[in-house]
Structure formats: structure tokens, C-alpha cells
Image (cartoon, helix red, strand yellow):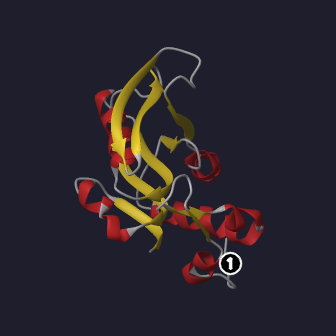
């Protein structure tokens, strides 16, 4: 699908800065204004799908919580399945888990034990790449279950936090950089 009136800079202009959220000193990148517009949301999903055009993806894994917004739409567009990667205690069945540090605290991610089978090709999706800790934790879950990470995709990348360096062994794509 073509979106002639949009480009990455226009997309970037739709992202709102929210100072001191979720805690003092953090400037939160709020993507909800971008999501509210059908053209910018479609442009985002189409651009993420284009970044995967050279890959065969079996599953799109969305990281809680804003990764959930992008991943099912991308899964549908690719004809792939969707798997949620959630914060500890949110999934209803048996899980594998990994604890990790993030830019403002500690967290644990979980995935159902039957989500990934050896050799399955996955794309990991989240809204934001900051320090790379969350994506790295998600990758360790996938690889621990025998999955193959074809690509990691992010709507926004905070380049000054150098998360891409932490993920250097993976194919990383971000649509918008700050």
C-alpha cells in the first residue's frame, strides 16, 4: 500500500514527548497520536512489513505492552502467527521466563512454553529500542526455546542509548530515530 503523503519525518512529528514519565528524568515517547490516524498507522505497519520483505517469518513476537499494538497487525500483513511476550504473572499457562535490567528498574519477561518450536523463524517487535535490555531478554527466551531470530523491529530508536550495540548479533531495524 502506498502512502504518498507520509514519510518517516512526518511520522516522527506525530510522536509526543511526555516528560517525567514513568518517573522523573525519563522523556516518554508517546506513539498514541501516530496510532490514532489511519494513514500513519497503516504507513507504520507497511514500513515494518517492507523491512521484512527479504525474510520468511513464521511468528511475530510482540513485547508487552506497546509491542502488542504493532505485532498483531504486522502478523496479519505477513500471514504469520502472533506470540505475546509478557511481563511476569500475566500469562495464564506454563511459561519460560527471563529476568533483566532496564533503563529504570528490573523486570521479568515470560512466554508460554509451547510458543516457540526449534527452527521457527521469528521477528521480535516493540515500539521502542532504548538500552536494548528488553529486546535482549526476549531474544534469550526465543533462542532458549530453539527459535531463530530473523529480525528485530522497532518503531522508535533512541540512538543515544546505544541499544543497537547491545543487539549487534541481530538484524535490527527502526523506523524512526532520535
**Where residue 20 sits: x, y (%)?**
55, 61
Q: Does residue 121 appear to the left or right of 37 in the view shown?
A: left
Quick check: 88 above or below 81? above
> 31 or 153, which lies in front?
31
Residue depicted at x 71% and y 67%: 33
> In which quadrant of the rendered image does the C terminus lie?
bottom left
Q: Nearer the viewer, residue 34 or 57?
A: 34
- Residue 116, by quadrant, is top left
46 and 105: which one is in front? 105
Residue corresponding to mark 1: 3
Quarter-of-image position of residue 39: bottom right
Residue 100 pos. (x, y %): 33, 37
* Residue 147 can be seen in this image: no
Q: Residue at x 76, y 64 (%)?
A: 36
Measured from the top left, where is residue 145 in percent x and y? 33, 27
User: Is 144 drawn above or below residue 80 in the view shown?
Assistant: above
Residue 166 x %, y %: 25, 55
Residue at image coords 61%, 76%: 11
Residue under the image location 59 percent in, 82 percent down: 7
Image check: 3 left or right of 93?
right
Which element type, helix, strand or loop, lies under badge 1?
loop
Amino acid at each position: 500500500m502506498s502512502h504518498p503523503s507520509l514519510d518517516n519525518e512526518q511520522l516522527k512529528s506525530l510522536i509526543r514527548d511526555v516528560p517525567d514519565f514513568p518517573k522523573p528524568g525519563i522523556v516518554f515517547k508517546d506513539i498514541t497520536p501516530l496510532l490514532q490516524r489511519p494513514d500513519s498507522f497503516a504507513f507504520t505497519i507497511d514500513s515494518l512489513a517492507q523491512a521484512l520483505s527479504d525474510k520468511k517469518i513464521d511468528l511475530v513476537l510482540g513485547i508487552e505492552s506497546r509491542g502488542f499494538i504493532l505485532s498483531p497487525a504486522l502478523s496479519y500483513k505477513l500471514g504469520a502467527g502472533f506470540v505475546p511476550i509478557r511481563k511476569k504473572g500475566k500469562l495464564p499457562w506454563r511459561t519460560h521466563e527471563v529476568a533483566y535490567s532496564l533503563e529504570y528498574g528490573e523486570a521479568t519477561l515470560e512466554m508460554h512454553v509451547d510458543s516457540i518450536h526449534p527452527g521457527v523463524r521469528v521477528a521480535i517487535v516493540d515500539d521502542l529500542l532504548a538500552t536494548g535490555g528488553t529486546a535482549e531478554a526476549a531474544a534469550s527466551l526465543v533462542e532458549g526455546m530453539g527459535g531463530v531470530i530473523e529480525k528485530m523491529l522497532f518503531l522508535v530508536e533512541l540512538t543515544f542509548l546505544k541499544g543497537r550495540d547491545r543487539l549487534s548479533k541481530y538484524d535490527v531495524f527502526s523506523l524512526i530515530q532520535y
